[in-house]
Amino acid sequence: MEYCFLGKSDLHVSRLGFGCMSLDPKDPQGVNILHKALDAGLNYFDTADLYNKGQNEMMLGLAFRDKRKELILATKVGNQWRNDGSGWDWNPSKKYILSSVDQSLERLQTDYIDLYQLHGGTMEDPIDDVIEAFEWLKSAGKIRYYGISSIRPNVIREYVKRSSITSVMMQYSLLDRRPEEEMFSLLKDNRIGVLARGTLAKGLLISKPAEHYLNYSAEQVAKVAATVKSVSGNKSDAFETSVHFVLKNPAVSSAVIGIRTEAQLKEALAIREAGLLREDQLETLRNILPANKYIDHR
């Protein structure tokens, strides 16, 4: 397994991260899957207080309470469940962040979080208060580093300019190359790591029937998927090719793959055995369609 430092931090993360959102807390195999991933070298595990109303964090706490120093544990804050459980509301207030961290720490059965991320963000947020909350949590030793999970260029620019964020989690794939326009160079120049999500574009690059995606028609999506398969040779290699395309970008620190089953874990781990894409293959993939660009929140 390959590793790299996340931005300017000393977080040495695996190039493949484990996205925990899809794990079912009721599945008795969940803890076993997490253990197998860690034993195989994946050391970055990403969750959020939102997932399964905190039960996702509880599963990680149960799985890793005796292995805490062996992994990089990341969670998120900002989406507050309503009291009646009917949904959640966006709450980036300083008060909510400072109170939520203690609940996450309890569920995760740890006294510190390696990477605490704002789970979204808008220009209407009290950004300075958000930053102040994260900085206080760092000074208190409750978190080691903080970042944001956002696809909004205008929001990302503000945090780059005004904070000491370590990372930005953002969507990036062959069907979503919007970060290439400006964001990747901005983050790389400021030594801020990128955690890429959505690498498989909801499965459209490997197995799911083509449909409209962002500004691409179903026909264009089908063309991209067909090219990935022709470059790869088969479905399994299409998975590897899609992930390697993302990891090949020098701004990306880790591709966070959503894993729910042991079969998916096995498929993800096979990527480490695959060779990197040749430059001619990369050019073929880059030239299938014009790269899309951000329209909103510029």
Image: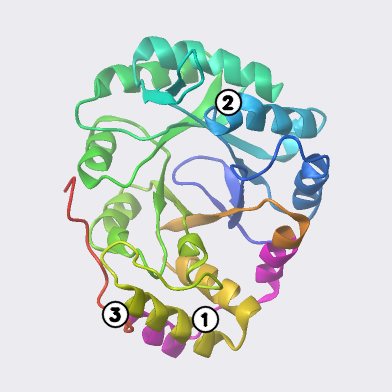
Instruction: Give how far across and how far down residue 8 sits, in percent.
Output: 44, 43
Residue closest to the eye, 223 or 101 = 223
Q: Assess whether residue 276 is covered by the magenta stretch.
A: yes
The chief SS type of the magenta part is: helix
Secondary structure under the numbered disc 2 in the rendered image: helix
Residue type marked 2: Lys
Residue closest to the eye, 268 or 188 = 268
Q: Would you place residue 131 above or below residue 122 in this image?
A: above
Instruction: Give how far across and how far down residue 294 sits, in percent.
Output: 21, 56
Secondary structure under the numbered disc 3 in the rendered image: loop
Q: Which residue is mark 3?
A: 289
The alpha-carbon separation of the residues under discs 2 and 3 comes to: 39 Å
Instruction: Give how far across and how far down residue 298 sits, in percent.
Output: 16, 48
Which one is in front in this view, the residue at disc 1 or the one at disc 2? 2
Q: Which mark is residue 53?
A: 2
Magenta stretch in the rendered image: 266-286
The alpha-carbon separation of the residues under discs 1 and 3 comes to: 18 Å
Q: Which residue is mark 1?
A: 277
Q: Residue at x 77, y 42 (%)?
A: 30
Q: Which mark is residue 200?
A: none
- Name which of mark 1 and mark 3 comes first in the sequence: 1
Q: Residue at x 65, y 70 (%)?
A: 271
Q: Is residue 275 visible?
A: no
